[in-house]
Amino acid sequence: MPASGSSSSPVARIALVGDRSPNVTSHTRVPLLLDALATQDHLVLDAYWIPTEDAAEPDAVRGFDAVWVLPGSPYRSEAGALAAIRTAREDGVPFLGTCGGFQHTLLEFARHVCGLTHVAHAENDPDADDLLIAPLACSLVGHEGAVTIAPGSLAESVVGARRSIERYHCSYGPAAHLDTLRAHGLRLTGEDEEGQARIAELPGHPFFLATLFQPELAGDGTRPHPIVRALARAAVEHAQTSARPSA
């Protein structure tokens, strides 16, 4: 199969949603990862950074072949982050949310699928009565730990193992309503050594994965994490399918 970006296949466009900053390590890793995906895996992605304030605009991420909501919260626009996630979820666009992206994925699903319209993120609304995302008992800033992955999950098929050591840089995590999220179709497929949810995915969606850990921080950026590589493959497949002539 020719690489995306060649004369015989379409370019896969990826929306990088977040408030880009040179002080956020995940953001500075992205160019390295894109270069590595192109040179090592022949997965060429045309990347566009979309600030969360712009992501709140209608159709901001429509037309893209993948959406990645990156770390860097508190986002300047919670509504923008949620809008990007919702579009990817409803339109079947390959999606990855990492760290703050994971937290807001749960928040979006709780509000718009489960009907929990008043749940909040403590980083954005610390005085809210119903916190879906709350401060972690122990901050995971700079932490590295084991994640156990559920058998038969998308995460397992992507990572290729039932256990993985992953890097974190966050202080917030899921605190409530997880049974309700599960009952409405969200699958929590990875947990840490204390049994806390660290991976979420949506069965039936072409590719919808969110992790509290940051796969973009694996290694030195020259060998993309399997999750990042899988997102790129899903984006290329989306571009190819979208460009395929109708029968």
Image (tube, rainbow, N blue to C red):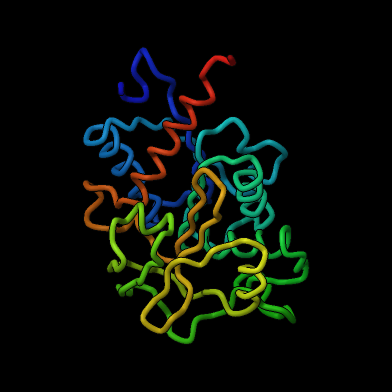
The percent coordinates of residue 13 (x first, y second) are 48, 31
Residue situated in front as seen by the camera: 199 or 205: 205
Q: Residue at x 30, y 21 (%)?
A: 2
The percent coordinates of residue 177 (x first, y second) are 65, 76
The percent coordinates of residue 228 (x first, y second) are 36, 48
The percent coordinates of residue 179 (x first, y second) are 62, 75
Image quarter (top left, top right, bottom left or bottom right) of the C terminus: top right
Residue situated in front as seen by the camera: 201 or 41: 201
**Is residue 122 at least partly visible in the picture?**
no
Please identify the quarter of the rendering in which residue 31 is found: top left
Residue situated in front as seen by the camera: 98 or 203: 203
Looking at the image, residue 156 sits to the left or right of residue 189; the answer is left
Q: Residue at x 35, y 57 (%)?
A: 215
Looking at the image, residue 27 sits to the left or right of residue 223; the answer is right
Seen in the picture, residue 30 relative to 4 is either above or below; the reply is below
Residue situated in front as seen by the camera: 232 or 25: 232
Image quarter (top left, top right, bottom left or bottom right) of the N terminus: top left
Q: Residue at x 44, y 71 (%)?
A: 170
Seen in the picture, residue 30 relative to 193 is either above or below; the reply is above
Which residue appears farthest toward the bottom when viewing the image?
A: 137
Looking at the image, residue 113 sits to the left or right of residue 167; the answer is right
**Is residue 91 at least partly visible in the picture?**
yes
Tally the marks.
0
Q: Residue at x 61, y 53 (%)?
A: 81
